[in-house]
Image: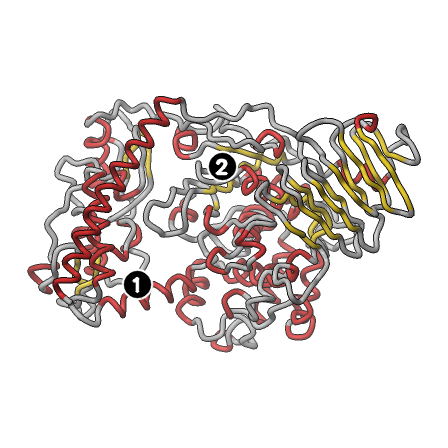
């Protein structure tokens, strides 16, 4: 947890994000006014702070650097510096993540989020994202983690600011009781095996998250996934599927033929995946607690607009972040401060490949990380060079960066799988020692999908750089949609609409959820039309697949045929349904929520309109 809270495990986009943040800082310092857009954002931030009950505190920016309201001094020149807008920072924690000097970070916190002294105010929600019944411990000085209320705030070894926040948050309307979040499950949650957060979870997890999935390791312990209220059950199912894929045995591989010990190590080490709302370091985002974090905004699902459109503003970070979870807690890291892993031999292979590809400044070939000296130095200090390198390789191996044209924002030379073989032979030899050649879970498309989704590569469809490595796909909902397979043995699932399923070169299976007798099946010349008599289940399907498989067996000229090996393998991919019912806000709570949002946005509308008027006057 200490590594995770300090950012050791939030590695994926730090270099890329810091480049953008640095650009924002440069732009904000070019003139005292910067832009009216920045003014509007600043005014909006102040409005949100006021609505949330956060008071501005005295700061050094106005007196030392002549800063205006909603600005702070960056102290880039030691005893002075330039003024920057508070609107660039979503939280007090963000002040410490932008490369500011120490005095600049402190002034950012003081001017934008209140001083270290809380003056009796509960700063937990604004400084650390804490919920009712918790406070911010301020273990990191200007920020920290959230803890449940305690009786003796000043006798528990907390920093002074943490003790003060404990006293303010837990006596000013806080009775020490952390209220669990209401379940927030959508219509597909049960089918996809997603449930409400169990009572066995800690009070903090039940307060911050409202959806749950887990994988049970061979030792009987869970590897847990927690989801925020904005995530769909499909996003959580996909995260669980990627985790299960990484832990799935790969026959005849050197280190992956039996991954039970890796899963056991993860469970013993308390590995968790936290999936908060929003985007990393953005205002209003959810909070990760003890787990590896994977945010809503970086979790596309197969078939959605982000995935099909190859939207790198919502790039698929799931492969990377979940791999970090497996690598750090299961495979193991050969550096101090990390938990014991199960595969030191494979980590040695990864280390050797990393050493070969790393920047020339570290004696490598410069294939990975060249020119990103500050980021590489940070990773070296953290002991996380191998984790970032492996994630770059795996992302490219499964096609995530081919459309972009270079691996991991250009940090890794190869862009596609074939490039790895040519440019990074050590990685090419390393990957199949643990990882499968193709992706093996049943990928469900969202119920909004319509059109055709293909698993065959098509240069005109950017997403097929990724989907070509899939084998199995299923539809949700009732939209008319078509599926196209590839040369593998494909498993298909249909929905309540009209579907055409076209197989590829392997023995393909179409699964139907009802008993065979519930369907009318008519086959002619290798093409079958299957019509479900039950409403809102499997609709009408036209297919050339080799096997039609039903809940009670296969169809072979008639119902009642025993289930084939191919069909058995497909049905094993279908998630086990959860028993937890979908829950939502009661009518009164929902109404209050809507009214509250209306008031917030009405206030913001008025304030932004005023900012527009100011802008016009200045023009």
Residue at horizontal 78%, vertical 29%? 551
Specify few, some or many for label 2: CA neighbours under 10 Å numbering under 14, 14-19, or 20 or more: many
Rendering coords of residue 528 (x, y %): 85, 42
Q: Closer to the N terminus: mark 1 or mark 2?
A: 1
Given residues 189 and 15, the one toward you in this image is: 189
Instruction: Identify the secondary structure beneath mark 1.
Output: loop
Rendering coords of residue 587 (x, y %): 39, 22
**Residue furthest out toward the left:** 63
Left or right side of 291 for 357: right
Instruction: Identify the secondary structure beneath mark 2.
Output: strand
State the colouring used for the structure image. Answer: secondary structure
38 is higher (above) or lower (below) than 259: below
Given residues 606 and 194, the one toward you in this image is: 606
Specify few, some or many for label 1: CA neighbours under 10 Å numbering under 14, 14-19, or 20 or more: some
Give the Cα distance between marks 1 and 2: 31 Å
Q: Which mark is residue 226?
A: 2
Q: Nearer the viewer, mark 1 or mark 2?
A: 2
Q: Which residue is mark 1?
A: 99
Left or right side of 419 for 361: left
Q: Quadrant of residue 182?
A: top left
Asked whether the beta carbons under mark 1 and mark 2 sit within 8 Å of each other, the answer is no
Rendering coords of residue 576 (x, y %): 67, 31
Q: Which mark is residue 249?
A: none
Residue at horizontal 49%, vertical 37%? 226
Q: Is residue 62 visible?
A: yes
Q: Is residue 434 visible?
A: no
Given residues 449 and 52, the one toward you in this image is: 449
Residue at horizontal 83%, vertical 55%? 505
The C terminus - image quarter: bottom left
Rendering coords of residue 582 (x, y %): 52, 26
Given residues 410 and 555, the one toward you in this image is: 555
């Amino acid at each position: 947890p200490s590594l995770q809270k300090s950012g050791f495990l939030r590695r994926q986009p730090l270099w890329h994000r810091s480049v953008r943040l640095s650009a924002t800082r440069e732009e904000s310092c070019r003139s005292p006014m910067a832009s009216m857009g920045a003014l509007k954002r600043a005014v909006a931030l102040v409005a949100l702070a006021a609505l949330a009950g956060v008071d501005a505190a005295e700061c050094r920016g106005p007196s030392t650097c002549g800063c205006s309201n909603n600005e702070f001094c960056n102290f880039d020149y030691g005893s002075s510096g330039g003024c920057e807008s508070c609107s660039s920072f979503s939280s007090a924690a963000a002040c410490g993540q932008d490369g500011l000097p120490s005095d600049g970070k402190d002034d950012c916190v003081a001017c934008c989020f209140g001083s270290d002294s809380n003056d009796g105010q509960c700063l937990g929600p604004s400084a650390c994202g804490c919920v009712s019944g918790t406070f911010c411990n301020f273990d990191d000085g200007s920020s920290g983690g959230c803890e449940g209320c305690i009786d003796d705030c000043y006798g528990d070894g907390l920093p002074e600011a943490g003790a003060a926040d404990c006293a303010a948050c837990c006596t000013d309307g806080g009775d020490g009781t952390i209220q669990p979040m209401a379940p927030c499950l959508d219509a597909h949650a049960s089918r996809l095996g997603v449930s409400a957060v169990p009572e066995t979870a800690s009070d903090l997890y039940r307060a911050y998250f409202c959806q749950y999935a887990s994988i049970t390791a061979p030792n009987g312990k869970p590897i847990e996934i927690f989801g925020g209220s904005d995530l769909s059950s499909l996003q959580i199912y996909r995260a669980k599927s990627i985790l299960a894929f990484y832990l799935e045995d790969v026959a005849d591989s050197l280190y992956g033929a039996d991954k039970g010990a890796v899963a056991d190590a993860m469970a013993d080490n308390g590995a968790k995946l936290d999936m908060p709302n929003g985007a990393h370091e953005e205002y209003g985002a959810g909070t990760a607690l003890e787990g590896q974090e994977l945010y809503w905004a970086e979790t596309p699902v197969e078939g959605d607009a982000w995935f099909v459109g190859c939207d790198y503003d919502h790039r698929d970070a799931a492969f990377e972040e979940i791999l970090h979870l497996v690598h750090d807690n299961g495979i193991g890291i050969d550096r101090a401060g990390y938990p014991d892993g199960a595969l030191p031999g494979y980590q040695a292979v990864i280390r050797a490949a990393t050493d070969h590809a790393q920047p020339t400044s570290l004696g490598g070939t410069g294939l990975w990380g060249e020119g990103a000296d500050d980021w590489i130095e940070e990773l070296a200090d953290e002991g996380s060079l191998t984790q970032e390198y492996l994630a770059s390789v795996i992302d490219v191996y499964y096609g995530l960066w081919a459309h972009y044209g270079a691996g991991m924002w250009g940090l890794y030379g190869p862009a596609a799988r074939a490039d790895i073989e040519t440019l990074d032979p050590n990685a090419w030899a390393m990957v199949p020692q643990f990882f499968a050649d193709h992706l093996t879970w049943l990928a469900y498309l969202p119920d909004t999908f319509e059109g055709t989704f293909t698993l065959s590569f098509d240069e005109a469809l950017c997403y097929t750089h990724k989907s070509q490595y899939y084998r199995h796909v299923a539809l949700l909902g009732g939209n008319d949609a078509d599926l196209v397979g590839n040369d593998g043995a494909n498993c298909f699932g249909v929905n309540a609409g009209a579907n055409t399923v076209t197989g590829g070169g392997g023995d393909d299976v179409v699964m139907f959820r009802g008993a065979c007798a519930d369907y009318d099946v008519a086959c002619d010349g290798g093409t079958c039309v299957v019509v479900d008599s039950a409403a809102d289940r499997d609709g009408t399907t036209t297919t050339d697949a080799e096997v039609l498989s039903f809940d009670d067996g296969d169809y072979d000229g008639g119902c009642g045929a025993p289930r084939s090996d191919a069909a058995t393998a497909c049905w094993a991919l279908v998630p086990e349904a959860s028993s937890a019912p979908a829950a939502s806000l009661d009518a009164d709570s929902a109404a209050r929520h809507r009214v509250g949002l209306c008031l917030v946005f009405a206030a913001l509308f008025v304030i932004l309109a005023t900012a527009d008027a100011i802008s016009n006057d200045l023009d």
